[in-house]
Image: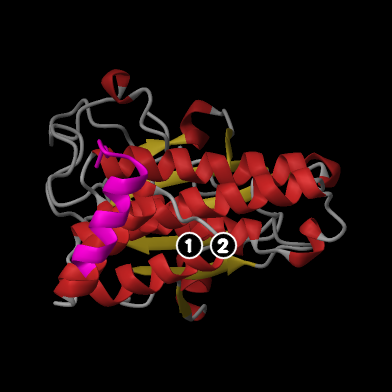
Amino acid sequence: MNLSLSSLNSSPSLSSSSSSPSPSPRSTYSTPDKQRKSAGIQLDSDGCLVKRVIKEGYGELPPPRSLVTVHYEAYLSNNQLFDSSLQRNLPFTFQLGTSSVVEAIEMAVPTMKVGQEAEIVSTQKYAFGKLGLPPYIPPNVSVIFKIKLLSFKFKQNDYNNFEALITRAKEEKETGNQFYNKTNYKKAIRHYVKGIWILSDPEQTLGINEGEDKLLKETFIVLYLNLASCHIKLKDGKRALSTCEKILELGGNTAKFYFRMGQAYALNKQFDSAKRSVIQAIRLEPIVKN
């Protein structure tokens, strides 16, 4: 097993039998006494993810999309070890921002410097969810990760041009679409908003030509349309309408836009406006796919 859960089926069971893995040597990490001296840092808004620095690192934080390499140990809340790269003597490498690891790790590693060792305590919210991962991870369980950031790689030029900017935004859109199709609209929103944020960097779009400006607006509009659809699914009429207004500012007056705008107006009980928007959608495209 590793943090991406790609090899769970080959992991030892978490039952209390003698086959459970024994804890790996702790020499890589500082002593428990030193751990307790470090105050916790809350990494989310509701206290479900806390980081405690065991040993300070050095240098810069890994930039977004970096390829990071870590050593880690993973424990259940009863201190039972269930996974360890140290036991395998094989560091674990993954790319930030690709949703390829447990969310707790995705959120924590970007706050670490090379050489830093940290204890990450997560409730089920950012770990394995309410259902867990039977038979390996019990339902609704908190998890403790002990992580050391060994290195990261990042080529600034890879993402310092317009084409790469659009690619990154589209990657976020595709990830958002995957969550949308699973009806996980809140997570989809997170990725659509991140895509919009990527495109909103003025340093990356300064001096773009007319064709690039058109592509930029088109990508913005798609992200905002998807974002509006999420707000509509969540019955959040105020945010849905606000998002549609941004699309209108960008010139996205397509049939799909007017249909979304009609839905947003309807959620806000502005039925006359909703009717006009839907009529306009039908005029532009008689058969509109939702």
**Which quarter of the figure has residue 154?**
top right
Residue 36 lies, in percent from the top left, at 45, 75
Is 282 magenta? The answer is yes
Residue 166, position in %: x, y? 66, 44
What main secondary structure does the magenta stretch of the protein show? helix
Determine whether label 1 and label 2 are within 8 Å by CB.
yes
Helix or strand or loop: what does disc 2 sit on?
A: loop
Q: Residue at x 76, y 43 (%)?
A: 211
Q: Which mark is residue 250?
A: 2
Three-letter code, disc 2? Leu
Indicate the amino acid at tag 1. Ile
* Residue 208 located within the stretch drawn in magenta: no
* Residue at point 17%, 66% (across, down): 235
Q: Quadrant of residue 266?
A: bottom left
Q: Nearer the viewer, residue 240 or 105?
A: 240
Q: Which residues are magenta?
A: 274-290
* Residue furthest to the front: 283
Circle 1 residue: 247
Task: Choose top left, top right, bottom left or bottom right for residue 275.
Answer: bottom left
Asked if residue 13 can be seen in this view, the reply is yes
Q: Secondary structure at mark 1?
A: helix
In the image, is residue 250 above or below residue 174?
below
Would you place residue 134 above or below residue 131 in this image? above
